[in-house]
Amino acid sequence: MTSSRKFALLALLLLSVSLGWLVVNYPVTEWLVSYAGWARANLVYSIPLFVLVYVTVTVLMAPGWILTVLGGYLYGWLLGTAVVSLASLAGAVAAFLAARTLVRDWVAERAQGFPRFAALDKAIKRHGFEVVFLTRVSVVFPYNLLNYLYGITRIDLGRYVLATWLGMIPVIAMYVFAGATADDILALARGETETGNTGIVLSVLAVVAVILLVVILTRTATRILEEDLAEGEGEDTSGESD
């Protein structure tokens, strides 16, 4: 295991322990409920704040799925999907532009250590929009790193923005939906509503259905993407044989 992976695992462990300690020793749930009440009552302030935090997290390449779920909890499914989609796209564009200007050399060095980047770059030359879209739906490449890697490819900003936005929506909608229904499921489980077991079952089934739909879409996108990348890698092999 490389030193970077060891560091990442250690950081994840420390973060998990810290979060667990906070939940046990501090009224985290009460704080979250209190903030959610403020956020929903003050959308004109809370949405820009949420977007700013999300963009910062994306640019720093930190995991954003927690914020995505939180967006669903705070704003519901429809508004939450719109807000998170906007924030995620803004972060992706900020990283893309940074890679084209400020940190291009650093990104190029990272790309050299990324085994399939050459095949990805060749696939973009043939099917730029399609490849960007598929990588957003698929899980073959890490999302936050892709934002920077695309900045040193030949994809133009317009196609990058549209393909990124469309490709991210299904996964974002899934996480936001989970966050939007979490409050209802917890309330049902605590017996605080009158819907009883039927309501719990319906809520859980709705979440499972959305997850299954996204999983099927992701697997399909991954298969198509692998075919495109294999074609690019085949070109590399034929070029070397010449």
Image (cartoon, rainbow, N blue to C red):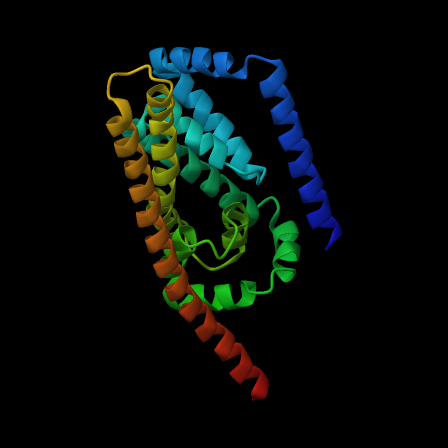
Q: Position of residue 13 (x, y in %)?
A: 67, 36
34 left or right, relative to 103: left
Q: Relative to residue 205, is residue 17 depicted above or below?
A: above
21 left or right, relative to 83: right
Q: As drawn, which residue projects farthest toward the front?
A: 197
Query: In percent of the image, x 34 and y 28: which residue is there?
Result: 180
Q: Relative to residue 24, is residue 209 depicted above or below?
A: below
Q: Position of residue 214 (x, y in %)?
A: 34, 48
221 left or right, relative to 238: left
Q: As drawn, which residue projects farthest toward the bottom?
A: 242
Q: As drawn, which residue projects farthest toward the right?
A: 3
Front in this rendered view, residue 184 or 220? 184
Q: Position of residue 102 (x, y in %)?
A: 60, 44
Front in this rendered view, residue 226 or 208? 208
Q: Quadrant of residue 16?
A: top right
Q: Relative to residue 94, is residue 195 depicted above or below?
A: above
Q: Position of residue 40 (x, y in %)?
A: 35, 15
Q: Quadrant of the N terminus?
A: bottom right
99 left or right, relative to 33: right
Q: Relative to residue 80, is residue 96 depicted above or below?
A: below
Query: In percent of the image, x 39 and y 37: which residue is there?
Result: 175
Q: Quadrant of the C terminus?
A: bottom right
- Numbered label tally: 0
Query: In percent of the image, x 24 and y 16: which residue is there?
Result: 194
Front in this rendered view, residue 233 or 90? 233
